Amino acid sequence: MDVSNPMSCVVPSAHGPVLAVLAGTTTPLTGRGISELSHPRVSQSRVARILRELTVAGLVERTSAGSASLFVLNREHLAAGAVEYLATLRQQLWARISEHAEAWSRPPVAVVIYGSAARGDGDTASDIDLLVVRPSAVDDDDPAWHNALTDLTSQVERWTGNPCEVLDRSEAELATMAAAGERLLMEIRRDGRAIVGSLATVPRPVAVA
């Protein structure tokens, strides 16, 4: 899955970013506005052609506002539900990871996604990077814990097609990393998204002279 444009795994053309913008709002937008919001960026002329096609198909509704045209997703269209689901694939992934982790016999203190998947600037080859914070009562060699981590890694790879890399640390180990000035912690704090627990679980690294 292209972590910067998940819809592209089903809609690989420029239609995907345009549909993603329309699915993300109920506010009518101009073609220029859709172009500016699209990611990856789609030119205004290409957006205009796509909007004409989607309007003919009935998936997009066009209204006039003076000399401008405004466009909005027709949510009564049979295909609208599929478009809205595809536009939220990243959120669907977060939800699946959360549900998986919270079902463990001893759930993690936190699960934080970081790196390109969290920033949304990767591609189909990007890793899904997860920090999984181990409860203090669970040893680092606990078989049940490692089985759960292995299963989560396998499931994420099946859900996305992307490699999944898990950083397994306890809160005490994170504190040691922070004391050593590990820059990775700053990256996680800056870009990370907590899908279980809180991002505050990740300590700020100490500046090392």
Image (spheres, rainbow, N blue to C red):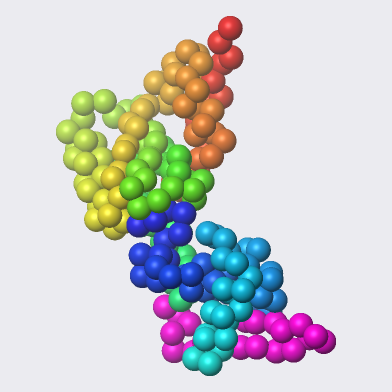
Query: Against 154, is 182 above or below?
Result: above
Q: Quadrant of the N terminus?
A: bottom left
Left or right position of 16 against 9: right
Span of residues in magenta: 59-82
Query: Against 205, is 191 above or below?
Result: below
Q: Is residue 93 magenta?
A: no
Q: Residue at x 36, y 70 (%)?
A: 10
Residue 88 picture location, percent across and down: 47, 65
Residue 173 picture location, percent across and down: 39, 21
Residue 47 picture location, percent across and down: 58, 74
Q: Is residue 75 magenta?
A: yes
Residue 136 picture location, percent across and down: 36, 27
Q: Residue at x 61, y 78 (%)?
A: 48
Q: Residue at x 33, y 48 (%)?
A: 125
Residue 134 in view here: no
Residue 122 in view here: yes
